[in-house]
């Protein structure tokens, strides 16, 4: 039996969230503040997971279910916190009537933290009269905010997961919002509503899908997060020139979004199998792997740049050994600590760590440029990062065996 909600308390919590976001500077438009104060986020998140303070015996994160029935105060206050609320793991729907804790797993749907939602709508430069395509409806909360600010008729939202969309639709319609909704893969946009003035993606892609450019009016904008199998991320705001061309710049800051399911990393098997043919004699690494793995903003940025050199590589750590695995070329590399140095062993046609080192060399030589100093050019069949001191970066996977990076290394 659902517990009654104290709407006055929920309203106070919404007002407090809006005040907090305003202090952070993410609500410069009074219309967006009014939307945060009105849209009942708790309606869109009847159940979600929060991480427990302690990991389990195997070191996995324990995700505790949170519902009104389990702990009403915790649920309601979390709903109005500036926190991402995970609602699904590994594509599996939870039974919120009898929810169970999750151990590890990959989040596949969530309600994005409100400050980031507001930042995205602001960065996309939304204006009255714009027609918008949102990719990744999720719980529907961000969709509701856009509907409240711009009108339901201005917003179309799609999601690849029909079960998620059904739940979001029920919440949206229950709150009086009636935007066009569809089950669709964001990789291909949504032609029935094209052309649009803005596309905003709440998931990440390895490269900019050409369909999104074709479905945006010339002069329109696409806000998208780019990522790769090394889990480096960068946000980019593109202005569309024509059906095949768009240009823009990377945006500052660090965020991460779940990958579009068609762009998610494949399983690569057992790392022990990949090291069987590694050479016995290692070399000393020129760069410490912490350059791309440490929890710093610079490493976050470097991991994104490294993906331009090894777009099919994945990274995992077993014990104290770092493994790089390329499922397309069959190449592999390991980095093993040896005193103050790291030893590198590489096998295959693509020297994975060597390519990453070239990017790190070029980055250092360019004076450690920040994300916003990079531009992105998208044309027919080519997507290139550009920096005046780091030429030769590409986001198009292309042919790894022949790929070269002129001017890098």
Image: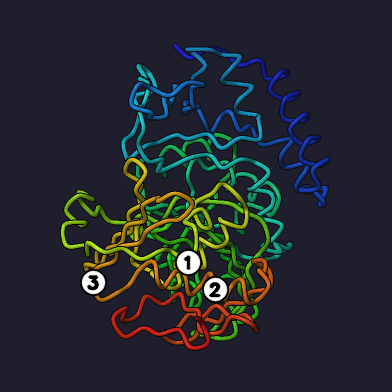
Q: Nearer the viewer, residue 93 or 168?
A: 93
Q: Nearer the viewer, residue 328 or 260?
A: 328
Residue with the mark numbered 2:
361
Q: Name the residue rendered at 37%, 18% in the picture.
A: 97
Q: Name the residue rendered at 40%, 71% in the picture.
A: 354
Q: Position of residue 255 (x, y in %)?
A: 58, 52
Question: Which of disc 1 and disc 3 is earlier in sequence?
Answer: 1
At numbered mark 1, what does the secondary structure look like: helix, strand or loop? loop
In space, the residues marked 3 and 2 are separated at their CA atoms by: 22 Å
Residue 317 placement, left or right of 148 = left
Is the C-beta separation of discs 2 and 1 under 8 Å?
Answer: yes
Q: Position of residue 232 (x, y in %)?
A: 49, 58
Q: Quadrant of the N terminus?
A: top left
Is the C-beta separation of discs 3 and 2 under 8 Å?
Answer: no
Question: Which of disc 2 and disc 3 is earlier in sequence?
Answer: 3
At numbered mark 2, what does the secondary structure look like: helix, strand or loop? helix
Q: Position of residue 107 (x, y in %)?
A: 41, 40
At numbered mark 3, what does the secondary structure look like: helix, strand or loop? loop
Q: Is residue 389 above or below residue 62?
A: below
Is the C-beta separation of discs 3 and 1 under 8 Å?
Answer: no
Q: Is residue 155 above or below residue 399?
A: above
In space, the residues marked 2 and 1 are separated at their CA atoms by: 9 Å
Q: Name the residue rendered at 60%, 67% in the picture.
A: 236
Residue with the mark numbered 1:
286
Which label was assigned to residue 348? Answer: 3
């Amino acid at each position: 039996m659902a517990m009654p909600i104290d709407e006055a308390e929920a309203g106070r919590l919404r007002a407090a969230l809006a005040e907090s976001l305003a202090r952070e500077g993410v609500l410069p438009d009074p219309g967006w503040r009014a939307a945060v104060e009105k849209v009942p986020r708790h309606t869109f998140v009847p159940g979600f997971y929060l991480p427990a303070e302690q990991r389990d015996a195997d070191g996995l994160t324990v995700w505790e279910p949170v519902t009104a029935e389990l702990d009403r105060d915790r649920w309601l206050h979390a709903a109005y916190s500036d926190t991402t609320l995970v609602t699904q793991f590994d594509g599996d729907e939870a039974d919120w009537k009898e929810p169970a804790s999750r151990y590890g797993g990959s989040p596949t749907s969530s309600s994005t933290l409100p400050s980031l939602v507001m930042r995205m709508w602001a960065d996309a430069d939304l204006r009255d009269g714009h027609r918008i395509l949102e990719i990744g409806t999720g719980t529907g909360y961000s969709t509701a905010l856009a509907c409240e600010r711009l009108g339901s008729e201005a917003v179309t939202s799609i999601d690849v997961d029909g079960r998620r969309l059904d739940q979001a639709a029920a919440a949206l319609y229950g709150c009086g919002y009636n935007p066009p909704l569809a089950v669709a893969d964001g990789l291909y946009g949504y032609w029935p509503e094209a052309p649009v003035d803005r596309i905003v993606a709440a998931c990440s892609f390895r490269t900019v899908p050409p369909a999104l450019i074709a479905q945006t009016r010339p002069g329109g904008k696409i806000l998208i997060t780019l990522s790769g199998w090394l889990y480096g991320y960068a946000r980019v705001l593109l202005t569309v020139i024509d059906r095949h061309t768009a240009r823009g710049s990377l945006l500052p800051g660090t965020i991460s979004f779940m990958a579009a399911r068609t762009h998610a990393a494949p399983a690569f098997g057992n790392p022990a199998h990949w090291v069987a043919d590694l050479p016995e004699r290692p070399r000393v690494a020129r760069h410490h792997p912490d350059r791309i793995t440490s929890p710093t903003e610079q490493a976050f940025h470097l991991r994104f740049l490294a993906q331009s050199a090894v777009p099919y590589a994945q990274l995992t750590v077993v014990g104290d050994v770092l493994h790089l695995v390329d499922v397309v070329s069959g190449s592999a590399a390991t980095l093993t600590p040896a005193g103050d140095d790291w030893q590198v062993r590489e096998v295959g046609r693509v020297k994975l760590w060597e390519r990453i080192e070239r990017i790190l060399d070029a980055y250092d030589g360019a004076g450690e440029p920040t994300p916003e100093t990079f531009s992105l050019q998208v044309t027919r069949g080519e997507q290139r990062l550009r920096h005046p001191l780091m030429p030769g970066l590409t986001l198009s996977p292309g042919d790894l065996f022949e790929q070269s990076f002129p001017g890098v290394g």
